[in-house]
Image (cartoon, coloured by chain):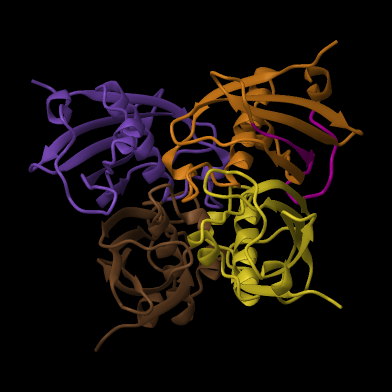
Chain colours: A yellow, B purple, C brown, D orange
Amino acid sequence: MPGAESIVSFRVRYSETDQMGTYYNSRPLEWFEMGRTDFLRNIGMPYAGIEKKGVLLPVIEAHLEYRGRARYDDALKLITTATMVGRARIRFDVRIVHADSGAEIVRGYTIHAFADLSGKPIRPPAGFVEAL
Amino acid sequence: MPGAESIVSFRVRYSETDQMGTYYNSRPLEWFEMGRTDFLRNIGMPYAGIEKKGVLLPVIEAHLEYRGRARYDDALKLITTATMVGRARIRFDVRIVHADSGAEIVRGYTIHAFADLSGKPIRPPAGFVEAL
Amino acid sequence: MPGAESIVSFRVRYSETDQMGTYYNSRPLEWFEMGRTDFLRNIGMPYAGIEKKGVLLPVIEAHLEYRGRARYDDALKLITTATMVGRARIRFDVRIVHADSGAEIVRGYTIHAFADLSGKPIRPPAGFVEAL
Amino acid sequence: MPGAESIVSFRVRYSETDQMGTYYNSRPLEWFEMGRTDFLRNIGMPYAGIEKKGVLLPVIEAHLEYRGRARYDDALKLITTATMVGRARIRFDVRIVHADSGAEIVRGYTIHAFADLSGKPIRPPAGFVEAL
């Protein structure tokens, strides 16, 4: 049974390019976050709401493979899926492709702990794992 | 009697360039903030300490004039001065120049309110105006 | 006869917040750029195309008034209009408001020169002023 | 025989924090780049000069482990080393620690290809491997 998937369409901002003429290498981590935001909203667990309940999702690991260029104003598609890693961690897998050709630009993942406001590891909020 | 002045030396990061080959237009506001941080430390009122006392300095107005290009790894100099605007606002005037030639890159200012954690305007912390 | 207007809807990214809990003060300049991109596409003069013809639009002046807070994931609306300033400059006026309440967050403008790849001022591309 | 090592001291900018009160997760990639810039300058192969000769070093892989928090204005230390990966790739290993306590904040690496302006893989510039 396949899990939930989020697809976000967006365009590369000029501010996200660098003098090499393509996106700067840290931008995909900001795009990954758009994917997580959309994913969590889609499963009925918007992150803004999670934080208001005192649960944070700090990133503890990130991995990126840069596969292709994307230029200013290129239309991209961000595909995000998620799985629990043990009982108190979640992993988001992300692919970013050109919206028209499907050519891959970046793939990677981030792993997040569930933590309280002091940074202490905690369990996911009630209903989270089921929603996933 | 001239007021305090801060001078910060730094280099343009690759992440701060864009495909035009010079710094992206929002970066100077991030550089201005380095200048404020240094300025406030110099007068014995480090901003991290001010915030810990519950006093914020949100920007309420910013103005920038872009005078010249600066490329990746260029050595720049950031000169910051400050003056009170009435009793509860402060204005930082900033110039950014090439470290070697002195050629101007950006000049501008930001105006900040003193506010408490709820955003309500307040007076500067004790000793602040005197330190200035 | 009113000129063209662009309206872009977007949400505040987590990466755009700072520890004050609202958007960092340089982010609106990045949002302004999204507005310009959309505006120029709407009038049939997409900026990516303009640059390919060797015409750049570097910012020469920017002004921002910060009017209200916007938090992570807040839905915002960016309204952009434009007017020529003399024969070789263009000014974009921007307002950013909360999508639901209409409460204003930022207003400001940027002024841009038309320049060739060497940075020399030039006239707008053929048809630009008419399209505007 | 140990290789070259670069150490860069810097402070966390306010613009690099997010509403969680620590650095945003994409910022370390921007700091890693400061480390590479310094490392390459130290071995007599400044990256700005390499690019002028038509050699680019696009990132093809990045990995980050987030080990600890760092707040606005915290003094950090960035340690960078590098090794060739085969004949046409270079890997930079990076650790970021608190300047005073030495407590680790982030560790990770980036792998880069040597490429010409069209993106085609090429060998490192003459003298590069020896300088390393």
Q: Is residue C65 left or right of residue A69?
A: left
Residue A21 visible in the displayed image: no
Residue at the top extreme, as displayed: D1
Q: Count every numbered label the image shows and give the total.
A: 0
Could you tell me which residue is drawn at 63 percent across and 76 percent down?
Answer: A42
Residue B47 on the magenta span:
no
Q: Is residue D81 left or right of residue B46?
A: right
> Which residue occupies the foreground of this view, C58 or B127?
B127
Could you tell me which residue is drawn at 79 percent across and 16 percent down?
Answer: D3
Could you tell me which residue is drawn at 17 percent across and 50 percent down?
Answer: B121
Q: Quadrant of residue D63?
A: top right
User: Residue A78 placed where, x, y %?
Assistant: 69, 68
> Which residue occupies the foreground of this view, B8 or D95?
D95
Q: Is residue A73 above or below residue D24?
A: below
Q: Is residue C10 above or below residue D102?
A: below
User: Residue D50 placed where, x, y %?
Assistant: 69, 32
Q: Quadrant of the N terminus of chain C?
A: bottom left
Residue D119 on the magenta span:
yes
Residue span colored magenta = D105-125
> Which residue occupies the foreground of this view, B83 or C117?
B83
Residue D37 visible in the displayed image: yes
Could you tell me which residue is drawn at 35 percent across and 73 percent down?
Answer: C98
Residue at the right extreme, as displayed: D86
Q: Is residue C15 left or right of residue C109?
A: right
Q: Quadrant of the C terminus of chain C?
A: bottom left
Q: Quadrant of residue D101?
A: top right
User: Residue A4 placed where, x, y %?
Assistant: 74, 75
User: Residue A126 placed where, x, y %?
Assistant: 64, 67
Q: Is residue C120 above or below residue A95?
A: above
